[in-house]
Amino acid sequence: MVHVSNMTGAILPAQQVAEAARQVGAKVLLDCCQSTPHMPINVEQLGADWIVGSGHKMCGPTGIGFLWGRELLDQMPPFQGGGEMIENVFLDHSTYAPAPCRFEAGTPMIAEAVGMGAAVDYLTSLGMDNVHNHERELGGYLYDRLSRVNRVQIYGPPPSRPRAALCAFNVEGIHATDISMFLDQDGVAVRSGHHCTQPLHQQLSIGASSRASLYIYNTAAEVDKFIEALESTIKIFD
């Protein structure tokens, strides 16, 4: 399951789900790509058996991420062979190194790993509580301003409930792709499409949506610029 939806922004009750899963003997793999860059994460409290995250969403390089796991990692077979992941080789079988080496066959992505480590150090120096507090305040401001724009529908819970600093939305009568293209001409970057959540869009009976996302470097002034550009775009289609 995902910890934070990158479409609705909802922060899901991962700890309660993990506890319920444990009671029936199920295992939980928690996708924290949308939470680790934005808020403090305590893997012991979350209770998942595996946690995954991506480097590029936390100011690091592309093409690298992390897998955290409990003792189950040493019971899992490797998915590819190569150097450094073998413990012993015999004519009829091989034994594998303990985790994490068994999952890191061949020459590692050295530059990417160093870059991701630097990104972790950078976020740690900022303090994840500070990052989360900044995003929570700015995300609430974004939601409030966007909700006041005529013909706009925002998806996901209100700021009074746990949610991330992003807003997926549609403007009545205007396709999401048109919204993003016209905003781009005003120097505002939003994403349009399914956001890798096509089944969720189908469940909401919408073909696509636009998404405005905030991070540590964004400001209230930039939110204001986004709203001004969006209102100007809507007027073009009126």
Image (cartoon, grey):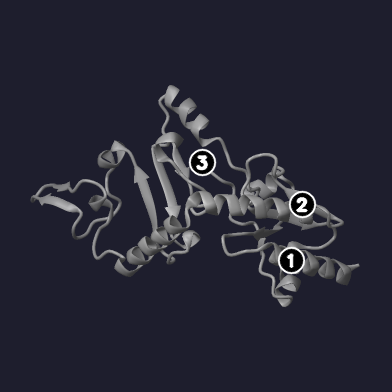
Quadrant containing the C terminus in the rendered view: bottom right
Count the marks: how many? 3
Whether residue 113 sits left or right of residue 60 in the image: it is: left
How far apart marks 3 and 1 lie (CA) works out to 31 Å
Query: Is residue 226 left or right of 63 when viewed as pictured?
Result: right
Question: CB atoms at circles 3 and 2 under 8 Å apart?
Answer: no
Q: Residue 1 carries which label?
A: 3
Q: Position of residue 180 (x, y in %)?
A: 71, 68
Considering depth in this image, is 135 or 91 the residue closer to the camera? Answer: 135
Helix, strand or loop for disc 3: loop
- Give the x, y percent position of residue 7: 64, 51
Left or right, residue 43 beside residue 184: left
Which residue lies under the disc numbered 1? 226
When the figure is inspected, residue 237 is found, relative to residue 68, above or below; the finding is below
Three-letter amino acid code at the position of disc 2:
Asp
Tell me the residue that label 2 is attached to.
144
Q: Residues within 10 Å of mark 3 (few under 14, many from 20)?
A: some
Up/down of 184 relative to 167, above or below: below
Residue ID at (18%, 48%): 97
